[in-house]
Image: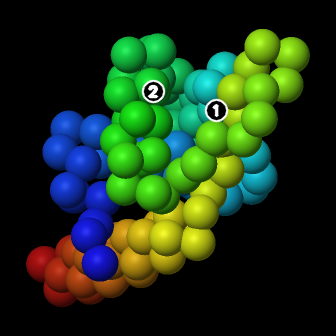
Amino acid sequence: MAGLADLGRFSEPALHILISLAAGPKHGYAMQDDIGGLTGVRPGPGTLYGAIRRLEEHAYIEALPEQDRRKPYQLTDAGRAALGAELQRMRSLAATGLRRLAVA
């Protein structure tokens, strides 16, 4: 399975989008607000929609029918799996780093 690293410079924004969509479908503006609340930094439209496009190309997310001129997106099964794998990788990396700090 391809990982989020395959998304290049959009890998971090993609991770944030997947985490946002894990709570349920959202349109772009709602994702920006949610990500801003999670990270303290609200992504700009170019970054957000560039990452959305790449996530759609990898079939990690899919668009839903428009609602009031807004296009919501939701996680696919592949997106849920990719997010889970990335978060497990990050957990392992963080645990190793914390152990090493405790010894140093």
Question: Mark 2–mark 1 contact, CB under 8 Å?
Answer: yes
Residue occupying image coordinates x 20% and y 56%: 6
Residue plotted at (77% across, 27% down): 66
Q: Is residue 2 above or below residue 9?
A: below
Give the SS element for disc 1: helix
To which quarter of the image does residue 67 belong? top right
Rendered view: 87 above or below 67? below
- Residue at point 52%, 44% (across, down): 17
> Could you tell me which residue is drawn at 24 percent across and 83 percent down?
96
Residue picked out by circle 1: 31
The one nearer the camera, 64 or 3, is 64
Three-letter residue code for mark 1: Met
The secondary structure type at the circle numbered 2 is helix
Q: What percent of the width, then of the height, locates residue 93?
A: 27, 76
Measured as percent of width and height from the top left, residue 11 is found at: 29, 47
Instruction: Please tell me the numbered disc located at residue 48.
Output: 2
Residue sitting at the far right = 68
Can residue 33 be seen in the rendering of this structure? Answer: no
- Residue 45 against residue 10 in the figure, above or below: above
In which quarter of the view is residue 12 placed? top left
**Horizontal arrangement in the rendering, residue 34 relative to residue 103 (left or right):** right
Measured Cα–Cα span from mark 2 to mark 1: 9 Å
Residue positioned most to the left:
104
Which residue type does callout 2 highlight?
Leu
